[in-house]
Image (cartoon, grey):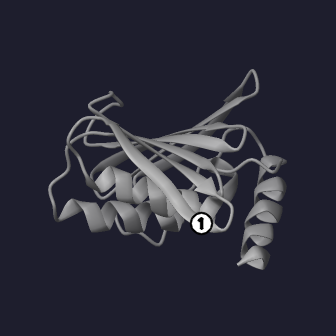
Amino acid sequence: MLGGEQEIRDAAQEESQDQAVIQDENSEVQGNEHSRVEEKGGVRHGAFTAMGLHFSVIKMVQSFILWVGHEEASMNTISTALSLPSRPPSSSRILGTQEWTTLLAQKLAGKTKHQVFIFADELEPDEVPMCEKIVFQKLNQSPALFLTTS
């Protein structure tokens, strides 16, 4: 597990040296419309769409905020998860009724060892597995979009 985390961090460091705005048309998720990353004043914001869903990521030190929804970002549901040494990540829904966000935050915190905040629009039950697949594919393809190296 630790080797995989180091690989993610190494990839994130390499990608962070790339240009500030990236157009990514090569996604394994069918229907990916576009992807972009912008960095201003030390804050890195990335956004992508896939399969009719909008995703937005704000990367911070050892944490990130992920927005998932059908339209522009808003705060209907908020969940968070903390990665804990030698224990499963702890998660909680702060606002809203979308229970799937708590589980996704917990999975992401466990994989990334970052604190994760999920803001989400209401998704249909059949959209949730697709959403998770898209997020984890994007995390594997572009870890610097989500992760900090220190």
Q: Position of residue 71 (x, y in %)?
A: 27, 35
Question: Which amino acid does the dot numbered 1 rest on?
Answer: Arg
Please tell me which residue lies in front, 73 or 120: 120
Residue at 30% x, 50% y: name it.
53
Residue at 59 percent across and 66 percent down: it is: 87
**Camera-side residue: 53 or 113?**
113
Q: Secondary structure at mark 1?
A: strand
Would you name the residue on which mark 1 appears? Answer: 87
In-front residue for pair 111/25: 111
> Could you tell me residue 101's position as x and y percent?
34, 51
Left or right, 118 with respect to 25, comes to: left
Residue at 68%, 51% in the rendered image? 147
Residue found at the very far top of the displayed protein: 41
Question: Whole-percent x and y of residue 17?
Answer: 84, 48
Please give the name of the residue rendered at 57% of the width and 55% of the height, measured from the top-left corner. Answer: 24
Q: Is residue 120 above or below residue 136?
A: above
